[in-house]
Amino acid sequence: MDIIDFIQKDDFYVIFDNGVVKESNFANNNDFIISKNGSYKIIYTNALSKQNLNVKVNENINADITEIYCNNSVNCLYDSKIELLNNAVVNFLTMRFVNSKINYNVKVILNKKSIFNQINVCKINGEATGNSIAELNSIFSKVDIKNIIVNESSKKQKHNFSIKHNSMDTESHLVNYAVCDKKSTLLVDNEGFVVENAERSNMNQITKGIILDLESEISANPVLKIDNYNVIANHGASIGAIGDDELFYLMSRGLTKEDSERLILSGYYAFVINEVKEEKIKDYILNNL
């Protein structure tokens, strides 16, 4: 898929090349304000060793934001900060299909009655360290994050997700779908914090992992730190291989082991991918996974 294929007629878009704005119809640099409802595309190409992004979404704005990493083969650090002002609603899709080692830091700040829904699809062909933090700083803010993380690089990758409930009546949901293959190691750590005055908060965190060979490893470490007990908080993790019965059934119908695994994984991913609105992007994700 060419870069231009990601952009639809009415999209706001910005294309970064070597860390600077190459083309855009709304932004002059990597620090900008979203002040109109609509669909936004943020595209990185030929990244430098460090790429920064600072986005503020104005009050009462409803924005669909898609973040795309293209042609990035240089070891890179990505630093992103996204702040939602009161009553802002953001649906944020990140696609990290990267052929190099990367580190990334993402911080999302939510204010009163703001809502942040994220789908993060991550397949990195190299070592990776990622830190994602969501801070719910005011009443009735809500975050819903779904991650697909695939490691078949034969390298070690670590992804840390942290959600902080800093105000009462806040809500968070975090689900990780992890897949590991080809002698790779994947560490997925979840942290949930509820401060003393954050009563009536609701926090749910789940990690599901599938290991495709005997020499790969997935480790999940869910941690909850709660200083107020008038809350709802749940966490869990389940990791294992694809069931032999499922594989046997599909292979008995003429599929190879590899095709059988791919079919099962497509169903595993479907819970997340089916929420992607644009068919072209949905197909792009499935083809790259």
Image (tube, helix red, strand yellow):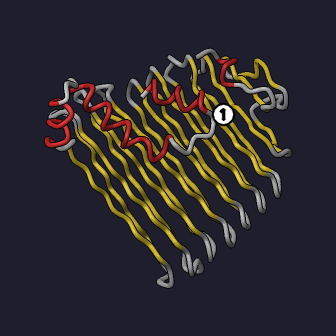
Image coordinates for residue 195, horizontal then vertical, percent: 54, 74
Q: Nearer the viewer, residue 39 or 136?
A: 39
- Kindly indicate the quadrant of the structure image that contains residue 245: top left
Q: Is residue 89 left or right of residue 183?
A: right
Q: Is residue 37 left or right of residue 218?
A: right
Image coordinates for residue 185, horizontal then vertical, percent: 28, 36
For label 1, the residue is 52
Q: Nearer the viewer, residue 171 or 62?
A: 62
Mark 1 Cα-neighbour bin, 10 Å: few <14, some 14–19, many ≥20: some
Image coordinates for residue 21, horizontal then vertical, percent: 76, 22
| Residue that protrudes farthest toward the bottom in the picture | 230
Q: Is residue 225 left or right of residue 135?
A: left
Image coordinates for residue 205, horizontal then vertical, percent: 43, 61
- Kindly indicate the quadrant of the structure image that contains residue 154: top left
Q: How many marks?
A: 1
| Residue that protrudes farthest toward the front in the picture | 253
- Location of residue 42 with respect to 45 vertically, above or below: below
The residue under label 1 is which amino acid type? Answer: Asn
Q: Nearer the viewer, residue 173 or 112?
A: 173
Q: Secondary structure at mark 1?
A: strand
- Kindly indicate the quadrant of the structure image that contains residue 289: top left
Q: Quadrant of the N terminus?
A: top right
The residue lying at 69 percent from left, 73 percent from top is: 139
Q: Nearer the viewer, residue 115 or 262?
A: 262
- Location of residue 195 with respect to 188 vertically, above or below: below
The residue lying at 68 percent from left, 40 percent from top is: 65
